[in-house]
Image: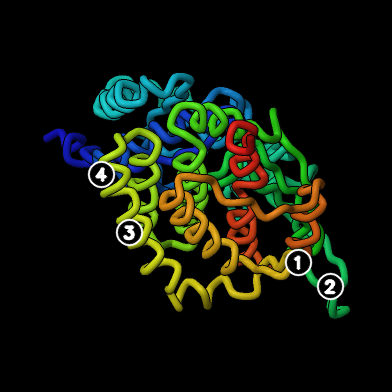
Amino acid sequence: MDLSRFAFARPHVLLVESPGGTASRLALERVLRERGWPLTDSPADADILAVAGTGLRPYADRVWAQLPGPRARVDLAHPEHAGGALDGAQRALFDGAAQGEDAATRSGPPSDQSEGDGMPAGHGMPAAHGMPAGLDMADRAPDRDGLLLDVLHVPWGPALPWWPAGLVLHSRLQGDVLAEVEVSWVGDARSASSFWTSAAEAVGPARTAAAARLDALGRLLAVAGWEGERLRAQRVRDALLDGGEDAVRLAGLAGLQRLHQRVGRSRTLARMTSGLGRLGGGDVTARYRQWLTDAIAALESGADSPVTPLPDDLDDVLTRLLTGTEVSSARLVVASLDPWLTGALVAGAARD
């Protein structure tokens, strides 16, 4: 009996964003949400690799090599094709003959991943040259307390879910602490700004400003593991970008107020994020709460709220904030800076 129809009725999808792929990512997120297909954070748990945009091919190829079979892949260049592309990927999972050919021709993951593939801490860490079977072997160095600890050089990004498109962090990991961090970018470092600029021209700066903040909030909630509110944030975001005035007035503002009550006042999330990534007198908690406050104010007033100014060199800011941070906290800090890192909150059309 062929059980693939049951096994892949709701395939798990690993979604990563290329520079310039914001529109494709939003389209994929919407279709996946409407179908109830779960998103996953790991290649080991993925049936489909979905790449929003086309600017990460060599890195996405490394992640693709880590997906177990049966597997399928989507490289989405045009957001209007999101549904059809996912339909094709699901059909590929059902195709036993094609999956058998794929399994027969696979050579396994690359043995030398010194460039990284975007999956830190066990997913694509760079291999030490000259070691048996390409296994990672740690160096040793004193930590900030003078203890001699193992040191691993671990890349984060660019092919990482819930991650600013094109961002790469080269980290030196001692225990669970990022001892050193260097920032680099693949492709256009502020590629998302063009999408939000176009959105502001289409639906107005107030709606776009609120949607940009909810997009950032959705990614932060995904990193924090709050799936229900992540989906709610994305539904309201999409209503703001695509819905009519009545839908925005009724569903958009009501959804935002619900998010403000549930997320903005959540003690659990605040305990998780309080004190992290302190910058300009605020931390991660203060930033996501401000996103919600600004989004509601934008919809109620019909005008965008002023954006908190950040230093020009965000790469240096990110390096400073992450150095000495625990691994469990680092991604929350990155997510709290995501809208500035990608340019979503400094889009020219929204700042006339």
Foreground: disc 3 or disc 4: 3
**Quarter occupied by residue 194:** top right
Of the image marks 1 and 4, the number of the one nearer the N terminus? 4
Tell me the residue that label 1 is attached to. Answer: 174
Q: Give me the C-alpha separation between circle 2 and circle 4.
A: 45 Å
Give the image location of residue 146, x and y in percent. Answer: 88, 79
From the viewer's side, name the closer residue of 31 and 145. 31
79 in relation to 222, above or below: above
- Amino acid type indicated by mark 2: Asp
Q: Nearer the viewer, mark 3 or mark 1?
A: 3
In the structure shown, which secondary structural element does the residue marked by tag 4 occupy?
A: loop
Among numbered discs 2 and 4, the one appearing first in the sequence: 4
Task: Quickly name the residue at label 2.
Answer: 143
Mark 3 secondary-structure assignment: helix
As measured in the structure, the alpha-carbon distance from the residue carrying label 3 to the one carrying label 1 is 34 Å
Counting from the top left corner in percent of width and height, residue 65 is at 52, 33
Q: Amino acid at mark 3?
A: Gly
Amino acid type at mark 4: Gly
**182 left or right, relative to 219:** right
Q: Residue at x 79, y 64 (%)?
A: 179
Can residue 48 be seen by looking at this rendering? yes
Of badges 2 and 4, nearer the viewer stands 4
Give the spatial CA distance, label 2 vs label 1: 7 Å
Q: Give the quarter of the image for residue 109.
A: top right
Dot 1 crowding, Cα within 10 Å, few <14, some 14–19, many 20+: many
Q: Which mark is nearer the camera, 2 or 3?
A: 3
User: Where is residue 258 drawn, in percent x and y?
Assistant: 33, 62
